[in-house]
Amino acid sequence: MAYLEGTNLVAAYGVVPILHECSVKVEKGELAVIVGPNGAGKSTVMRVLLGMLEATSGSVTLDGNDISMLSTQERISLGLAFVPQNKNVFPSMTVEENLEMGAFLRTDDIKKTMEEVYSLFPILYEKRRQLAEELSGGQRQQVAFGRAMMTQPSVMLLDEPTAGVSPIVMDEIFSNILDVRDAGMAVLMVEQNAQQALNIADKGYVLVSGRNEHTGTGHELINDPEVRKKFLGG
Amino acid sequence: MSSDSIDIINAFALLTNFVILPALSYGSQLALGALAVTLVYSVLRFSNFAQGDSMAFGTMIVILLTGFMINQGWTISGIPTALLVIPVAIIGTAIYLLSMDRLVYKFYRRVKAKSITIVMASIGVMFVTGGLVRFILGPRPQIFADGERFIFSVREFKAFTGLEQGIALKTSQFLTVTIAILLVAFVFYFLQKTKTGKAMRAYSDNKELALLSGIDPDKVVTVTWLLVASLTTIAGALYGLDKGFTPQQYHLLLLPIFASVIVGGIGSPLGAIAGAFLIAFSEVLLTYAYKKFLIYLLPLSMHPTSLVQLIGTEYKYAISFMILVIVLLIRPTGIFKGKVLVDE
Amino acid sequence: MSNFDNIWQSHKTTISFTIMALLLLFVGFNQSWALVLGIFNLCLISAIMALGVNIQWGYAGLFNVGIMGFAALGGVSVILISQQPVAEAIEVGGFKMLFALLLGAITIVTGVLLNRKGYNKWLIALVVIIGYLATRYYFSNAADLIEKVNPAKTGYLGGLGMHVMFSWIVGGLAAAGAAWSIGKITLGLRADYLAIATLGIAEITLYVIKNEDWFVRGVKNVAGLSRPVPYEVNLQNSVWFQDMVSWFHSSSLELLPLADQTAQLSQYVRASSVIFVKLCYSGLFITILVVMIVLANLALDSPWGRKVRAIRDNEVAASAMGKDITRQHLQIFVIGSAIVGVAGALLVTYNGIFIPTSYQPLRFTFLIWVMVIVGGSGNNLGSVIGAFIIWFLWIQSGPMGLWFVEMIGNFTEEGNIITEFLEDRVHFLRYILMGSVLLTVMRFTPGGILPEKNKEL
């Protein structure tokens, strides 16, 4: 059994069905990427894994334990961390306070984790007393990432971390993500830039209207002619 | 006063006694109320129309307890008994506000109701609260200040300085300003430096992300109401010590309080305080009769015959609203750029 | 049980109105017909007010907390239109007041124009302050002169001496004008700004009415307003009315000896004249209410109404239209407030006296709100039934509370502290009752008694 696993998830917003028996899993030290067209339910998978949306059926397990019935907060305290696509910082708080809030549930010393975040994103150290709303888009993304890391999670869920940033910043963010993975975290990421994401992914899921359409390693999917034709623009 | 000379010192003393001191204490009372409205607004996302009547509720407990203490002879000479009972009154108000939250507001948070629906619910709460206060205490005025009335009186001041115009410092004014400064300092320290305070700010900034950080919304809401109860009770008690208590008067405080909040920039604690003093000083400055003041400053030939009052005292409450309208027209975000101008 | 439920679901409008009618009839048989007609007429006026508020809330989600202010504007219109002018006051102060008001208007216009042209702010402030001081000087001078003219009886300028029905329209227009200026300032900003602004404008309107004696006599009230219906005394003296009453009561009169018949008849005539006048009012109010409901429903089914509902039901899609929404909300706000203004004018006409202190801004504003929510926001008939139920409850709960306290009093000694306390305070329980009714309905049946039919799910 994989470290984090969502099995046969079915979910709906009100009466509109979004997910039909969709399954994803990710191991520690592995980067899994979910790609697919708009409205395929990619972000919904994340919300269900986090308990922000209740699944009508299916199960979520973490390290072999069923966490389907737990609240979002309980899942967070068990080691899940989430970086939403937008509204992912506390705008009127300083960078440092943003990171502190990430560590809200921790009772131990958080200084060391904060130093780790700062060494990963040196620019944040420089701007630690500035308000998050004053930062650029890429820097804000780093704050969001750092805030999630402060919980010392075992699983990191990222919703389109590169949305709206320049290609250079995108490369930087991807390299940060790989660093996190190499540190032993399980990383599950939803991405719009399918080509680049699958390139670095250990595992990929292609989601279409709430169903698993293709599954495989990143390279398998990139080299799959059908996936190329349908989702990667040839 | 008969002299022809220009007398700046006496003019200033006059202004201090009749404008600056009253406006400072009134401003402090408004500031505490406005801060309470701001906290509810930032964390719970609605304009609390029940604020004025909640202040009446808190003050009611203070009045009842003060009466009881005086009856029992449990007083400390020189200190208003009301001060001694404030902590208990805060607990009472907190229990009341928290039960209202559980009975009324919690439901609307859960179903993510529009803020205007919660505003309407708060008007329902306002009526229940106002009705309770009038039922228990009656609609008539109440005076509950005891102890020394003055830190120093006009007579003492005149004897000490030899000035023609005296300044009196009322105990209630002194207490109001001192306690308000301490309380505001505490609230700001709490919000800026403590973990719970930061969690409140985080929750107000971005509810969903706060949840994702493991911040317990119920706890944030509870702490907010506790702070609101303290601010509300203390503001109400200080206002009552200064000006006496009638339920209707407290109910009407809603207007200057809302005006302070919006003028300062809705959602900004600092703005609420600045707005409160702006409103208080405008009210007092615009309704003050400057005749005597000008007599001190102008040569005999230019002495005014009328009261030289810019706006009649009867329009005191209207002033805050006029300022509100002007601010909405010129700078709808308020002095300290408020956060939310249109609905989310 | 479910059978009962079905009947209720399919006939709830009929059932609820029937129950209400039976309740009123019950009071009529047990207490008095004059009383019940009094309640009925005020129910009708409340229903018109509630209709105006329902249009604002139900059609556009606009929260008007200044209903009493708009109603007071309607009331003022009755005086300004229907009262006879006070010639002497106009002679001594009329033109001076006109001059002062003109000066004030010029000041404001100059200030606005200078601001538009981008002049120095301090210069503008100086101009406005000088203008204000001059206005205030002439103004208080004129007000003094006017108020000195026979202060016990007039002391104000009076009105235009026109027919009172004309003032109903003017009342609507006055309220519409006030609503337009408030709407211009606050619509498009946060929704609660409108609530706060309406609360403020209502307070200020009432302060002005109470304090400016030269205007509508302030707290000295204006009594003896002219009527659109006959006076009781005139009725009692008119032959056709006496004939009608004797015909109506002929069966009971014939039983009496001839000597007593005249005395009994005059008693009947007196009682009937009161009822007849109230019935005339009822007729007028019902006509106005029906016309307004028909118009409102026609408007709601028109293309305009569909657009209104589309915007209300799907704000996300509508927000793309931005400016359009604000304009539409302004229209609805003005229309709703105008209806409240008309109702306010009707209220003063019906009372025959204008008492500024009787406008308790939040208290009655709040009652109207309870009517709208309890009746069913968005449904025009709903606000009518809501108005009937709540006004009935409000009026009857006072005596009922006292009756209850007296019941307790029967078991206690004379001068018992608790009984005296309750007698003194029991009417405040009505606030708690109404607040609880509002909160309960909002929480458990947000649709009210008659929920809106065509609301999309």
Image (tube, rainbow, N blue to C red):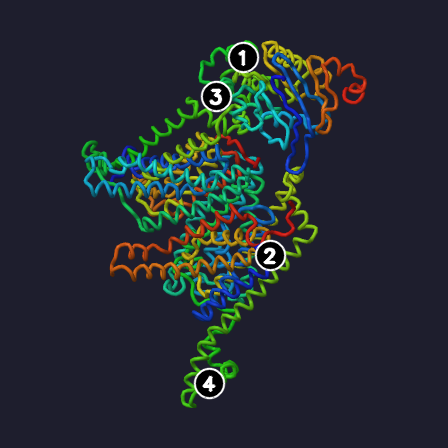
Please name the amino acid that badge 4 sits on.
Leu
Viewer-closest of B193 and C250: C250
Please name the amino acid that badge 3 sits on.
Phe
User: Is residue A9 shown left or right of residue B47?
Assistant: right
Label 3, secondary structure: give it.
loop
Q: Which residue is mark 2?
A: C3
Residue C98's mark?
Answer: none
Residue A117's mark?
Answer: 1
User: Is residue C181 shown left or right of residue B268?
Assistant: right
Label 4, secondary structure: give it.
helix
Q: Residues within 10 Å of mark 3 (few under 14, many from 20)?
A: many
Label 1, secondary structure: give it.
helix
> Is residue C374 placed above or below C42 in the rendered structure?
above
Q: Which residue is mark 3?
A: A104
Measured Cα–Cα span from mark 1 to mark 3: 16 Å
Q: Of callouts 2 and 4, which one flags the residue occurring earlier in the amino acid sequence?
A: 2
Q: Residues within 10 Å of mark 1 (few under 14, many from 20)?
A: many
Label 2 marks a residue whose chain is C
User: Is residue B137 shown left or right of residue B266?
Assistant: left
Please name the amino acid that badge 2 sits on.
Asn
Q: Which residue is mark 4?
A: C253
> Is residue C389 placed above or below A178 in the rendered structure?
below
> Is residue B293 placed above or below C172 in the rendered structure?
above
Disc number lying in front (2 or 3): 2
Disc number lying in front (2 or 4): 2
Mark 2 and 3 residues: CB-CB less than 8 Å, in contact? no
Measured Cα–Cα span from mark 3 to mark 4: 89 Å
Please name the amino acid that badge 1 sits on.
Val
Q: Of callouts 1 and 3, which one flags the residue occurring earlier in the amino acid sequence?
A: 3
**Which picture quadrant has residue A219?**
top right
**Which picture quadrant has residue B8?**
top left
